[in-house]
Image: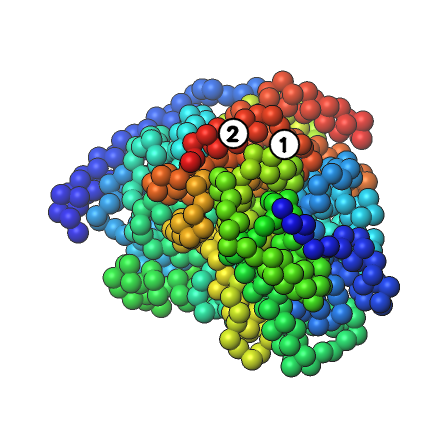
Amino acid sequence: MPALPAIAARAEVIRHHRQQGGQVAAVLPVHAPRALLRAYGFLPVEVWGPPGVRTSDGASHLQPYVCSIVRNALSFLLSGGLDATDLILVPHACDSLQGLGSILLDFIKPRQPVVPLYFPRSEGAGAHRFLAEELRRVATRMGEITSRAPAADEILQYVVDEETGDRLLLELHETRRQLPLNNADFYRLVRSREYLPREAFETAARQALAMRHPDSAPGKTLLLSGVVPEPTSLMAALDERQVQIVADDTLCSRRRVCPPGRSSDPFERLSQSWLGGPPDSTRGSSMAARSDYLVRQVAASGACGVIFYLVKFCEPELFYLPTLRKALQRKGVPSVVLEVDLNDALSQQMLTRLDALLEMIP
Amino acid sequence: MNPAAGLAYACNARVLGPAALRAARLHAEWQARGGAGRSPHLAPPLRVAPRCKEMVARHWLEGRYVQGVRKVAWVTSGAPVEFLTALGFYLLYPENHAAICGTARVAVDLAAAAEEAGYSRDLCSYVRTDLGSLFSGRTPVGRLPRPDLLLACTNICQTVLFWYRVLAEHFGVPLVIVDTPFVYGEEASPNSLRYVGTQIDEAIVVAEKVAGRALSARSFERVATRSRRATELWLEILQRNRHVPAPISAFDQFVLMAPIVELRGQAATVDLYAAMLCEVDERIRRGVASVREEKYRVLWDNLPIWFRLRAVAELLAERRIAVVASTYTNAWGELAPYLDPASPRESMIRAYTYPILNRGTGHKLHIMQGMIDDYHLDGVILHSDRSCKPYSLGQMDQRERLTGGLKRPALLLEADHNDMRCYADEQAATRLAAFAEMLEAQR
């Protein structure tokens, strides 16, 4: 398979941005207001864990029944992993992230300012107004931190630019079958959206899209659902078995690619965009909307089976799981659940279950 | 109204059932006078306790026959319900139902039915208990009425949002969500309060449609007045425990709190708590202590361990430890000042935005510090409840500050409010014994 265009590593990107005099914002899952952060001079770098950190630091603040994304993020912060960042943004994606945000603000009080962001769960017109105002509040706070005051037009331009980035990300997902990339490389590319400046991501995405080849016929095909494709050894295992992930439904990637907003007010526009995004567990979408969406994704991509790659203790995802699996079953689509802790290797037992799924699909 | 349902309701929920429950209450009162089942370490239950039990039992009895007679709403424990009560809805609290199952020790069997249906054991045990009850049709209360409306308010957790999504899918009825943005700092933003207000307005419109009638301002105010009064009385009852020795324990409160949760806004609830307050005052005058030889006074944080309520109370009382206050029971009293019957809508916005679970971990520490002073407490038991992350997260830092700055022994007790499989009797007994030793050493 052709090689993936070079993508700079996270640490390298952060170092380069700081050398240019820029500031870095650590953004916890799920919704990152990239455009706002960029407008105030921050490079948004998302923190999904990360895996493989020393968790003992976080263990003195969080109980063992908290998911490893939250536990690792806190451990990473406490062990100095976020020292190169100037702001910590904590979106309210679940009760555990709510708890983490609160502990950071009330007890740990890191050097960096901590800014929470509440994502509304109701569906009325009030939710849109609330979110637009909430984003304004976050922007005001960033203005206080940076002493910058970008004009509305300037912020709008960042919003529009990030929409282009999202459009390219969507295109990568939608043309996945034609991209001659193995699973590991594909996910390395799409997940670079978590930390690359939009301009750099666009370059990498366009290079990859230029590699499209109509004959890139995969072997067995699957849809990957879940939170985040970590541990990444799953990708290596799939590549070894010549299985291609042809559709993505992970929280960290496709599931938060939102359609562009319409308003000329940047906050309204961002709110419209986010609230118009794919049905999602962390937003508390209806069971029907979430399962219809997943079934449609499977049908559109031609995936023959689904892997639910879940992080243990992720309550939002676990609640939807029985409904989603039932909906897939009705359509004759087999699925498997692999529940992991970010710090554990993919066990032999899980690989056996993966193989059992593969035996069921043509 | 369905005539057959109406007849069954009138006979069973209004005449025969209440008569049987009244007889059971009289029997319980007679037994209590004779001293049956008394603990050597604990004061007998309040005389009003059988009346409280009868009231709650009548409510669940009504639920068995209410289908087709009154509109039914299933609601979360922190939901704004005054308008539903004013519209004549029968309110069912799945959380209370799950707690009843926990106390009756049938929760694990029910949870197993939910787990078989694919719901993970890592989900809240209340949810698993109730979904298991729904899927299996088994319940210790006889029968649960099918909802006409679901109302979930996120002021206690996000779990209820997902839980009610499952219920909405199962029953195919309207779900109203009142989403209350988490209050990280001192005050909720005007934006948050406006958002909550808009949703309450929308909820009223949906509820009126389901009820088939408009909300009367007079009824709304009347219910809000009763809610406020009951909440005030409840808070007064709790605050009587500032007296040394404490007249009732937090374990009593866990049982006696059912009406303030599920029958808030009803005249009978106000009467019950007024009578309870009188009896608590009488205990203080007579020097009756909830723990006979009270030596140490402690705070309980988080939900109780429903299936070991009595065992934990006895275990502590044996060591002369009285659990005199609880952040959990306090949560249903501390919002009394926010409820203003003259403007029920506006006051509901604040009252239902500010519950302890919708506020930061620092706020909860502040509340605990205040309770330590007000109730003259020697230590704190923090129930690290595997099934309740919003309540439990932050406890490790809170414990550090309680033991450090305040020099109060604080125990982190790992358990679960409903799932017995997450609780080890021996381990808990050892931990509580060690805690008792810490209290002794502190003196």
Q: Position of residue B369 (x, y in %)?
A: 72, 47
**Nearer to us in this view, B287 or B380:** B380
Chain letter for mark 2? A
Q: Residue at x 60, y 69 (%)?
A: A164
Residue B300 showing in the rendered view: no
Q: Position of residue B44 (x, y in %)?
A: 51, 27
Residue under pointer 2:
A355
Residue under pointer 1:
A346
**Nearer to us in this view, B236 or B64:** B64
Q: Give the farthest residue toward the left.
A: B3
Specify the quadrant of the image occupied by residue B221: bottom left
Q: Residue at x 54, y 43 (%)?
A: A244
Quarter of the picture holding the C terminus of chain B = top right
Q: Residues within 10 Å of mark 1 (few under 14, many from 20)?
A: some
**Nearer to us in this view, B239 or A79:** A79
Q: CA distance from mark 2 to mark 1?
A: 13 Å
Q: Residues within 10 Å of mark 2 (few under 14, many from 20)?
A: some
Q: Position of residue A231 (x, y in %)?
A: 65, 39
**Nearer to us in this view, A193 or B373:** A193
Q: Which mark is residue A356?
A: none
Q: Is residue A139 above or below residue B62?
A: below
Q: Closer to the observer: label 2 or label 1?
A: 2
User: What amino acid is found at the position of numbered circle 1 in the picture?
Assistant: Leu
Residue B47 falls left or right of residue A3: left
Chain letter for mark 1? A
Q: Give the farthest residue toward the right.
A: A19
Q: Is residue B109 above or below residue B7?
A: above
Q: Residue at x 48, y 33 (%)?
A: A358
- SS for tag 2? helix
Residue B172 showing in the rendered view: yes
Q: Is residue A9 above or below residue B290?
A: below
